[in-house]
Image (cartoon, rainbow, N blue to C red):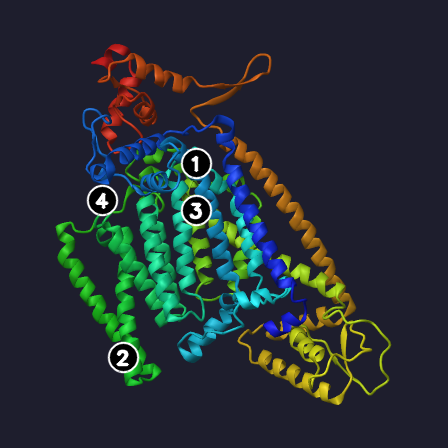
Amino acid sequence: MSSKATSTNSPSWFGPLVLGLGLLVMTRIIYWSYRIRMQAIDEYGLVIHEFDPYFNYRATEYLYEHGWRKFFSWFDYMVWYPLGRPVGTTIYPGMQFTAVAIKEFLFTNMSINDICCMIPAWFGGIATFLTGLIAYECSMPQNSVLTPFDLFADFVKHGKPSYPNPSPQNWTNLLHTSFISFSSPALECSLIAMGIMSVIPAHLMRSIGGGYDNESVAMTAMTLTFYCWVRSLRSGNSLTTVVAYGIASGFAYFYMVAAWGGYIFVLNMVGLHAALLVAMGRFSTNVYIAYSLFYAIGTFLAIHIPVVGWAPLKSLEQLAPCALFLGYQALQATEIFRKRKKLSRADTWKLRIMVGIAGLVAVMFYVSFVAPSGYFGPLSSRVRGLFVRHTKTGNPLVDSVAEHQPASNKAYFQYLHHICLLAPVGYLLTMFHLSDASSFLLAWGGVTYFFSSKMVRLILLLAPIGSILGGIAAGRMLRWSIRQLWDASTGDDNGTENKKPNKKKSKKIPNKEPNNDITNAKTSNGAAGKGPKRGRKVKNKTTVETEEEYAILESVVNENDSSSSSSNNPFEPINQAVSKIMNQTTEGIMLKRSLAVLLLLAGYMFSYTFKDYSWRLSIELSHPSIIVPARTRTGQKIKVDDYREAYWWVRDNTPADARILAWWDYGYQITGIANRTTIADGNTWNHEHIALLGKVLTTDLQEGYE
C-alpha cells in the first residue's frame, strides 16, 4: 500500500494524532509495568527478597566501597568456612556494576540498598520497551512481506535472496499515514506486545521490586541484544546502519555476558539464526557483516570477564557459534571470488563445496591435535540437564531443586495464561510474513519452548517471545478488524457522498480489494488532474464515469491480476476465489464485519481477564520469603519479621569471629544481614561440604558434633 494512497484516505492531521496517541499509550504501559513491580516495595518497604539477592547486595556493597580492582581480587573468608570463596572471579558482575554506576552518576542521594531494591522494577520497564521494539521491527513492511513459498522460489530459481522494497514506514510517511491504513500493523503489534510484557507473570517472577537477582537485569540485556540483531537485518539497510547495529549487538551481548550465565543461550540463539539464514538461502553481505561484528566484538569483550575467560573458545556449548563465524568468513570469501570471476551458479557451488571440505579437514586436524590435551571443556551439568533426565546430570543439588524439573501444562498456564493460546497464532502468522529479521522469531520461539519444557525455571525466557508473538497475533487481528469497520463507516473506501448519479455513459468494474488503495488514489485525484466526479455512489462496486478513467483502472486491475498469477504461492488461486466471494458479495462483506466485531469483543474480554489475573498473581509474587504476612486471631493483618530479627540478634549477640552452622539456603542471608561467617551458602560449588553439613543437621546431637 503506497503512502500516496493512504494519505488520500485520511486527513493530514490524522497521522500525527495517532502517533501522539501511540506515544501516550506506550508511556502509560511502561508506567504500569513499573507500578505492578513496585507492589512489594509499597507493601513491605525497601527490603531485599529471597536468598541469592542478599549475596548480590553484599557484592554490590563491596564493589562500591572498595572499587573494581579490589573487587576482582576479592577472596571472601566469611563463606564456606574454612575454605572461603574467590568472589571476584566466580561472579557475573554486570548487575553489581550497573547498581554502582546508577549510584555514582544518577541517584547519588539513594543508598545502595534502595537502588538494589529498585533495579528490578526499573529494568522491567526497559525490557517491556525493548520487547515492543522487537515486535515493531519484525512486523513492519520491510520485514514481513515474504512467504515460505517466496523463500523457496528464490533459492531454487536464483540461488540468492531477494529483498522486496515496499514504501518504508519512516517518520515522514508515518506522519501522513492513517493508523488503520499502514501496510503492516507494526504500531499495533508493538504496543500490544509491550502491554503483554508489562504484566506477564513469566517475567514478573524475576522482576519484582526487591528481587535483586541476575535475571532482572539479564532479561533487559537479552532483549537489547536481540533487538540490535534483528535491527541489523532489516531489509533495505544501508551499510552504515548494518555496521552500527552489528557493533551495538556485540556490546549488548557483552553486557548480557556480564549479567548472567544464561548468555550461552543468547549466543547460540543468534548463531542458530545466522545458520538458518544460510540454510534458507538468505546469506548476503549485510548478514555476513552483522554476524561477524556481533561475534567478534562480543567474544573479544566477553573473554575479559574473569568468570568467563576463554570459555567462548573452549567450552563445547559455545563452539558452534565460533565454527559458524569461521564458516561465514569462508562463505563470504567464495562470494567475493564468484563476483570477481563472474562464476556460474554451478561453478559457485563447486567452489563452495571445495572450500567446505578443506575447512572441515582443517578443523578435524586441529581438534585431533588439541583435544587430547584437555583443551575443550565438558558440558556443564545444567546444560546436560536440558537434554538428559534430571536424575543423570551428575549434580545431586541440581537434580533436587524444584525449579530445575520439567515444566507442566499447569506451570505454562500459571505464568503465561492466555498467551499459551495467542502466541501459537502469532507464530503461524509470522511464518507467512517472513524476512531475514522476522524469521528470528520462529527460531527463538521454537528453541525457547523446547528448553522451558525441560526446566520450569526457563519459562522466564518465554516471556519476551511470548509477548511478541502474542502482540503480533493480536495486533494483526486488531488492525484487520478496525479496517473492516472503518471501510463500512466511510462508504467502503473514501467515504464519498451518496448523491444522484449523473446520466453519463459509465461502466462498472468489480472492486477488488487488493487494488482498493491504488484505485481510490486514481479516482479521487482524477485521471487527468481533475477532482472526483460528483454523483458516484460507492458501495460494493466502483462506478467509473468516463472511458478515460475506465481505461486507467482496467490497466491497474490487469497489472495486479498478472502479478498475482505469477505469485510463488501455489494456493493463490484458492486465495483469489475466496477473496472474490468475501469482497464482492454482500454476504461475504457482512460476514467479515461480523467477524471483526466478534474479534474486538473477544480481544477486550481476553485482555481484561489477562490483566486482572496478572495483577492478582503479582500480589502473591510480591511477598518476600524473609517477611511473612499473617493474621491474628481477631483477623488483623500483621507482618511476621522473625527471620530478620533473628539475624539481627545473631549480629548483636555473638562474637564477630563466630561461625554459624545452618542449611546452605540460609547462608547468604546470615552473611548479608548478620555479618557472620557461614559453613555453606547458595553457591553450591562443593557437594561434599554440603553433604557433610546435611549429615550433621540430621543426626543426633552427639554424632553430629563429632
Counting labels gives 4
Amino acid at pointer 1: Met
Choose the circle earlier in sequence order: 1 or 4: 1
Q: Secondary structure at mark 1?
A: helix
Residue 472, visible in the rendered structure? no
> Does residue 480 appear to the left or right of 440 in the view shown?
right
Amino acid at pointer 3: Leu
Nearer-the-camera pick, 535 or 140: 535
Choose the circle earlier in sequence order: 3 or 2: 2
Q: How far is the residue under mark 1 from the one under mark 4?
A: 27 Å
Q: Position of residue 326 (x, y in %)?
A: 25, 64
- Residue 268, label in figure: none
Q: Which residue is mark 4?
A: 306
Q: Which residue is mark 3?
A: 461
Choose the circle earlier in sequence order: 4 or 3: 4
Q: Position of residue 290 (x, y in %)?
A: 35, 64
Q: Position of residue 55 (x, y in %)?
A: 32, 31
Q: How far is the residue under mark 3 from the one under mark 1?
A: 22 Å
Q: How far is the residue under mark 1 from the one under mark 2?
A: 55 Å
Q: Nearer the viewer, mark 1 or mark 4?
A: 1
Q: Which residue is mark 1?
A: 118
Q: Residue at x 68, y 53 (%)?
A: 600
